[in-house]
Image: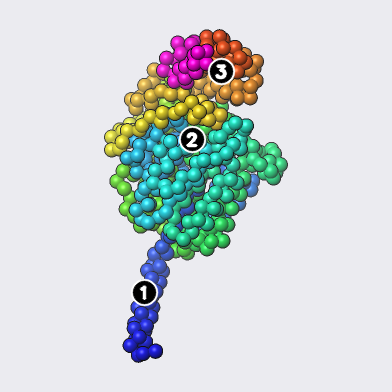
Amino acid sequence: MPSGSRHISRVVWLSFLVLVGAGFLFCSRSRPAIRNVLLISIDTLRADHVGAYGFPRPTTPNIDAVAREGVLFKNVHTPVPMTLPAHVSMLTGTLPPTHGLRDNLANRLPDASLTLAEMLKPRGFTTGAIVSTFVLDRRFGTSQGFDTYDDRFQAVHKIGDLSERKGDETARHARDWLDEHKAQPFFLFVHFYDPHDPYEPPEPFASRWREHPYEGEIAFADHCVGQVMDKLRQLGLYENTLIVITGDHGEMLGEHGELNHGFFIYEGALRVPLVVRVPGAAAAARQVDAPVSLIDVAPTIVSLVGAPVPKEVQGVDLSPWIAGRGAGGGARPIYAETVTPTHYYGASSLLGVIVDGWKYIETTRPELYDLRSDPAEAVNLLAREPARADALGRTLVSILAAAGRAPGPAPESAALDEESRQRLAALGYLGRSGGVSSQVFDRSKEDAKDLIAFFRKDQRLNKLVEDKKYAEARALCEEMLQQRPGFADCHLQMSKIAASEGNLDAALTAARKAVAVGPKNERAHLQLAALLKERG
Ligand SMILES: [Zn+2]
């Protein structure tokens, strides 16, 4: 070998050593570089049903294992207990009054909005998403920024229902995606739907959790999370991937009279887990008490990969807390809302704010709770603490004013076709249209608290019609119409029942009634139009 080339190779070798040394110094001072990002969202997962959050039964061994090596945020709220709006908040870092998606089917996120995938893509990440419910179908705009968006799946829930898929299929797709994209830095978003009702876990989870099927679904989803973690380890990617595990909202499980989620904004529906595992030993395992929101997920991920947080983002970058430097911060206001009572029943929306352990809910009869001494929100302290309620009410007004002023494109109509509406109905989403209530507090409407019994009847009615138990459904419809003669959806259900039984005249009469009492009810119009077309 000529001496010149030996000299060159020595120079190259020395340069290499210098670079490695510099890299080592850099790494020992800060965290090692994050090569990949994995964001997992588990639908309908109450924080207090996760082992790492103190649940006594072994629902989540795989999430708990990640939490033991990462940072667990103990006090996390979703801004809205509904799948699409909550995921849009998670993926954009903005509140529902800003991004404008406040219900499951009314709107789509405009292309001009900025999503986490769009924030990461310019940093060289290959982006992919695998979702498990039609509610997150690409037509709602959540796919923007993803190179691949896997929302195409087969029936698993009920015959003819193409609306959701089970976690094992989701996990299989995630593992395949990782195999395919392991060579490049990636951002993968995986959404599991299983804990959402109905609670029907597959075996062996069904037998093992016979007494607690919701927990069985959580255990199944956790098992599927474990399969994705195993794949990361097999591919040698577990140690250089930022792993974030969270949920979109909780589940009421009968608290305050609500079985599922979306109607109230009590803690059971709002508290979700958030576990962040940053690669490398520099990020020690710890638990964080500070109140945080689902809108913090996007800015935190963006900051951890070294990118600037876009100015549109309203969430907080949690990386100082992850590094153990975060301020205590009990006073940060956390916002939550649901417009379901307005959209479905013309009642007051619920708009809430939590500050320093106190929660205020603006509605017809406002509510004030001391979450520290009364986590069940059983005692309304409004009359006893009017000054505190006023102060929180003013905070709420300022949050809503800022959220409404925030720049951003207006949400677009999702313009659903009837097939999409049917899919949503099969998922238990009643699928009503109608404008979002104004942010001006209006206490003249009905209070949601007075409507919970009717809401449950409405849920039961949907189930009866879905299960083709028409005699029972009809009797329930009559009972409901006596309570609320102007409730168009009862007439609509009567029309659907008559149509299923082949009685076209009765179906038309009921559809006309539905349109007459609910002139803004789009489903009633669609039903009438379909029946008129059928009659020719
Ligand atoms: Zn959900």
Label 1 neighbour load within 10 Å: few <14, some 14-19, many 20+: few
- The response on whether ligand 1 sits within 8 Å of label 2 is yes
Residue that mark 1 sits on: 19
Disc 2 target residue: 135
Quadrant housing residue 321:
bottom left
On the image, which quarter does residue 27 sit in? bottom left
The answer to which image quadrant residue 214 occupies is top right
535 left or right of 303 in image: right
Residue 338 image position (x, y, % from top left): 44, 30
Of residue 406 and residue 287, the one placed in the foreground of this image is 406
Ligand 1 closer than 8 Å to the CB at disc 1? Answer: no
Q: How far apart are marks 1 and 3 (CA)?
A: 71 Å
> Looking at the image, is mark 1 or mark 3 earlier in the sequence?
1
Disc with the residue nearer the chain's start (3 vs 2):
2
From the image, state whether disc 1 or disc 3 is nearer to you. 3
Question: Residue at the location (61% across, 35% down)?
Answer: 157
Give neighbour class at mark 3: few <14, some 14-19, many 20+ (Cα, 10 Å).
many
> Which of the marked residues, 1 or 2, is nearer the chain's N terminus?
1
Helix, strand or loop for disc 1 = helix
Q: Looking at the rendered structure, which numbered label has been put on residue 213? A: none
> Which circle, 3 or 2, is nearer the viewer?
3
